[in-house]
């Protein structure tokens, strides 16, 4: 199964309990340049040296591209934040800091323990501000706003020279506008709170908006900073009763009292939830916010029995996981100037998206087609005119809606992917148009996180809704709402996939309540493209309408994290290969690149392996790729053992650098295996509907055979390892072939029939969704065609196994039921097959505790060393197998 792990936001930084250290020094040759070309006596790398390695992350660059900040993370937690000049030999190192950023081109700030430090990059001088509770930086005015928790509750506005240009007292909170020209704040006196608006530039005094004994909170700006909404809560009850709206353009202030507003739902109260964000429409006429049913405030978790209805749309845990919000909350719209409130969502249509102008709501019901057995049910979409309440059905039975429906940025159209084509619904004319029927290129790909077959995607629309930007397998297209198309790139002939690069601060698709909304892409300007070639090259291109794509950097490396400066035509990026640690490179267009920071220079002292992209052909004469990692200190006249790692497609990782480490979530690290004298093979697997196991066998054995023919590995010393879906692939393989001398399978699915009838307790969904069109690709149910499930189930052929197997899983794995591993272990035990199972009581689908990660890594290594190198077995192996 693919790991549904939610990532933390990029800006979320965890303070480290380490004393701040600030060092200014010139770059040392050892740090700036690898020692390539110098005579270095290399030695073998041992686990005692692993702590020397760090992980490099490029975080930010100044507006002029002259400075960058990056983070080096170490396993021992002694992380370093560095600020480095891209062309001069200057670097500043910091430890134990958090919440850092550049201010313009010459200042760097960081926040720790209520101390905000402003660091001058030119002089190296620092200014420390103590008792800071919050701060914000206005790029528009190049000013820093600081709120201090001192006796006066002071708010300071500092200019580019760190001079205080504005100072206010008794301030409790503030919010910077999206235009970054104004702040709204609250001021607390003895018996009253006031809300004021302050313009950062100029000398205008505070504009006082309102005053009350209650507290004010939840400040929300309109996207263009033309209006702001906030709420107040009673000091005695903490309930939100009032909503306040201030229109900056009209200098108009309006308040809503939920207890006296005639059309406010009398069974509901004002509420706040991530599902229903507060929003102000672009025309400044509407305010959207959530209400909660009063009856929903009680505790519903005191039931003594769970009632699982056979005719329910969702099973009980799924309803509990997803349904509570739908049942408890609604979204409403307030018309401040009309003094009216209307409901947007209902129990029948609880999910909502909006057109970009907020004139229409797209409503749907996630349970309409339930019960069904895909990950997400299809949707019917209804378009509701928010002003007139007119509502009509516009799209029926749309699958995978999250990726396949997209309102245009000017509010004229709704695009959606259906029947292998992109369609456009014209809101004004109430008409549908297939806009890609004439493209004659496949638009159906496998791009979403769950593995579904869906469109290759779209990053958005061009200005004024003139063209929709569409991806095929290789290229980028611009297609008008009438179906006229033009190809923007030339990737198909070169076998290079082009995509619009995700640059810092440029998210093409943004949250739109229960869906997404499109960005506006100016095709008249220069656009940076991400490129990945079928031959293993990666990099970035610059595109414009005159020259089309032109390479900035494109090579046999993994190139990412680019920061492009349009003004001086320079850029910074990160570069790495399997045998070359990540480095930071500065380059000007048409000039040679210059590495200005090299991570992990200590690698030069040790023997290291390398990777290559290999090709092979399966039994159907289909050409496939894979990665072959060579052992460190490789000798061409020697044959080596090899470990095969399986998990769908892996060839796109050929250039990734892997730090040597024993702290592994799934016990697999190609670098560690190569350092221990193994080849590692990672073959791409092309699966077929109804033949997931059979196709795995075909692809993997073909790949192994092609490597054996190279004459570099010992055919009788080949191991196999996989985790999750790769764990399933591993246990299936050893039921069908004896080419592996030993195998390791983590969190494996072993019986498709029993797993079909389990629940993913991390979401409450029945695991049936995994079998139709997702990873297992059965295309049917075990009740309709049990033979397909039996043919692809490892448990059905467990008696064929001759390969010693090490199973492992976590006893709190809510993604793949850990009993799957127990079932297989018991079957092997009953059949007296060589196997050992590791069950980690407090772990989930992957291991999170360092002690357990190290334990698994060592045991996996010992397992393969015993069977593939004939080393003396460790006591746990000897006892477990004898």
Image (cartoon, helix red, strand yellow):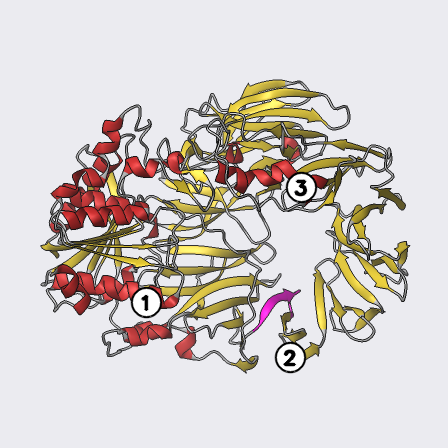
Residue beneath the point at 63% across and 34% down: 353
Q: In the rendered structure, are the residues bearing label 1 and label 3 in contact, judged by CB atoms less than 8 Å apart?
A: no
Judging depth in this view, the residue of 577 and 66 nearest the camera is 577
Please say if 367 is above or below 728: above
Q: Secondary structure at mark 3?
A: helix
For marks 2 and 1, give the one nearer the viewer: 1
Measure the alpha-carbon separation of dots 2 and 1.
Answer: 45 Å
Q: How dense is the environment of label 2, judged by Cα within 10 Å: few (below 14), some, or many (20 and up)?
A: few
Q: Nearer the viewer, mark 2 or mark 3?
A: 3
The range drawn in magenta is 97-107
Q: x, y (%) of residue 132?
A: 71, 71
Q: Name the chief secondary structure element in magenta.
A: strand
Residue ID at (31%, 26%)? 783
Residue 854 circle label: 1
Q: Quadrant of the N terminus?
A: top left
Secondary element under disc 1, as helix, strand or loop, is helix
Residue 102 on the magenta span: yes
| Residue holding disc 3 | 296
Residue 161 in the image, given as x and y percentages of width and height: 74, 73
- Nearest to the observer: residue 251 or residue 386: 386
Dot 3, crowdedness within 10 Å: few (<14), some or many (≥20)?
A: some
Task: Let me know if residue 66 is in the magenta part.
Answer: no
Counting from the top left corner in percent of width and height, residue 54 is at: 41, 69
**Residue contact between numbered discs 2 and 1, judged by CB atoms under 8 Å:** no
**Residue in view at x 71 percent, y 77 percent:** 130
Q: CA distance from mark 1 to mark 3?
A: 46 Å
The label shown at residue 123 is 2
Q: Earlier in the sequence, mark 2 or mark 3?
A: 2
Instruction: Determine whether 570 is above or below 293 in the image.
Output: below
């Amino acid at each position: 199964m693919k790991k549904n792990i939610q990532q933390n936001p990029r800006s979320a930084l965890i303070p480290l309990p380490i004393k701040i250290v600030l060092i200014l020094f010139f770059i040392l040759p050892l740090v700036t340049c690898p020692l390539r070309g110098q005579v270095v006596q290399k030695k073998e790398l041992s686990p005692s040296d692993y702590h020397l390695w760090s992980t490099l992350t490029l975080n930010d660059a100044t507006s002029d591209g002259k400075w960058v900040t990056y983070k080096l993370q170490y396993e021992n937690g002694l992380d370093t934040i560095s600020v480095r000049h891209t062309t001069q030999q200057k670097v500043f190192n910091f430890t134990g800091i958090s919440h850092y950023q550049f201010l313009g081109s010459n200042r760097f700030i960081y926040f720790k323990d209520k101390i905000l430090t402003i660091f001058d990059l030119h002089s190296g001088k620092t200014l420390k501000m103590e008792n800071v509770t919050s701060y914000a930086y206005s790029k528009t005015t190049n000013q820093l706003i600081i709120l201090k928790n001192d006796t006066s509750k002071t708010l300071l506005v500092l200019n580019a020279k760190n001079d205080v240009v504005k100072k206010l007292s008794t301030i409790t909170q503030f919010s910077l506008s999206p235009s970054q020209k104004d702040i709204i704040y609250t001021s607390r006196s003895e018996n009253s709170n006031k809300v004021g608006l302050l313009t950062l530039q100029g000398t205008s005094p505070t504009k006082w908006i309102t005053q009350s004994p209650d507290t004010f909170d939840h400040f929300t700006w309109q996207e263009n900073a033309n209006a702001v909404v906030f709420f107040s809560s009673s000091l005695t009850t903490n309930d939100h009763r009032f909503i306040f709206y201030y229109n900056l353009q009209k200098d108009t202030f309006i308040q809503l009292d939920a207890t006296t507003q005639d059309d406010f739902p009398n069974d509901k109260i004002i509420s706040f939830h991530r599902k229903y964000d507060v929003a102000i429409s672009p025309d400044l006429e509407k305010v959207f916010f959530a209400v909660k049913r009063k009856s929903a405030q009680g505790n519903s978790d005191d039931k003594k029995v769970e009632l699982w209805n056979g005719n329910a749309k969702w099973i009980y845990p799924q309803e509990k996981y997803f349904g509570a919000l739908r049942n408890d909350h609604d979204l409403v719209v307030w018309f401040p100037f009309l003094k009216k409130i209307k409901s947007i969502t209902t129990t029948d249509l609880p999910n909502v998206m909006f057109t970009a102008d907020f004139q229409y709501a797209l409503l749907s019901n996630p349970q309409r087609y339930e019960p069904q057995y895909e990950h997400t049910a299809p949707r019917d979409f209804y378009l509701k005119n928010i002003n007139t309440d007119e509502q009509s059905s516009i799209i029926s039975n749309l699958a995978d809606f999250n990726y396949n429906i997209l309102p245009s940025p000017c509010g004229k159209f709704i695009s959606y992917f259906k029947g292998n084509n992109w369609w456009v619904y014209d809101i004004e004319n109430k008409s549908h148009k297939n806009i890609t029927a004439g493209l004659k290129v496949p638009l159906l790909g496998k791009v979403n996180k769950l593995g579904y077959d869906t469109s290759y995607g779209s990053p958005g629309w061009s200005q004024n809704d003139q063209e929709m930007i569409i991806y095929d397998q290789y290229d980028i297209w611009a297609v008008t709402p009438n179906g006229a198309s033009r190809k923007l790139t030339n990737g198909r002939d070169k076998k290079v996939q082009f995509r619009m690069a995700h640059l810092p601060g440029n998210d093409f698709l943004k949250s739109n309540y229960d869906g997404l909304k499109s960005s506006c892409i100016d095709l008249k300007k220069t656009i940076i493209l991400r490129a990945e070639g079928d031959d293993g090259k990666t990099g970035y291109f610059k595109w414009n309408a005159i020259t089309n794509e032109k390479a900035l950097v494109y090579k046999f490396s993994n190139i990412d994290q680019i920061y492009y400066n349009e003004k001086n035509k320079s850029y910074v990026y990160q570069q790495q290969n399997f045998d070359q640690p990540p480095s930071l490179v500065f380059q000007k267009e048409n000039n040679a690149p210059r590495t200005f920071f090299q991570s992990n220079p200590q690698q030069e002292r040790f023997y290291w392996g390398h990777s290559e992209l290999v090709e092979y052909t399966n039994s159907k004469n289909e050409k496939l790729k894979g990665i072959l990692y060579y052992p460190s200190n490789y000798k061409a006249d020697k044959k080596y053992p090899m470990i095969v790692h399986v998990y769908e497609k892996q060839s796109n990782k050929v250039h990734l650098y892997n730090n040597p480490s024993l702290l592994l979530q799934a016990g697999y690290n190609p670098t560690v295996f190569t350092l221990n004298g193994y080849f590692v093979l990672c073959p791409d697997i092309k699966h077929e509907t109804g033949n997931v196991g059979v196709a795995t066998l075909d692809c993997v054995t073909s790949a192994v055979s092609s490597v054996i023919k190279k004459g570099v590995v010992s055919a009788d010393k080949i191991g196999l390892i996989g985790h999750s879906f790769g764990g399933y692939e591993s246990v299936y393989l050893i039921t069908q072939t004896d080419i592996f001398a030993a195998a390791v399978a983590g969190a494996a699915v072993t019986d498709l029939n029993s797993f079909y009838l389990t629940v993913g307790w991390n979401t409450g969904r029945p695991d049936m969704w995994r079998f139709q069109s997702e990873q297992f690709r059965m295309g049917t149910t075990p009740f309709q065609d049990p033979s397909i499930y039996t043919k692809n189930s490892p448990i059905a052929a467990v008696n064929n196994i001759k390969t010693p197997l090490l199973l492992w899983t976590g006893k709190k794995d809510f993604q793949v039921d850990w009993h799957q591993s127990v079932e297989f272990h018991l079957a092997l035990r009953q059949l007296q097959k060589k196997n050992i199972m590791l069950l980690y009581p407090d772990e989930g689908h992957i291991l999170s505790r360092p002690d357990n990660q190290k334990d698994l890594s060592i045991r996996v290594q010992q397992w393969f060393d015993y069977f593939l190198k004939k080393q003396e077995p460790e006591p746990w192996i000897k006892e477990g197998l004898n």
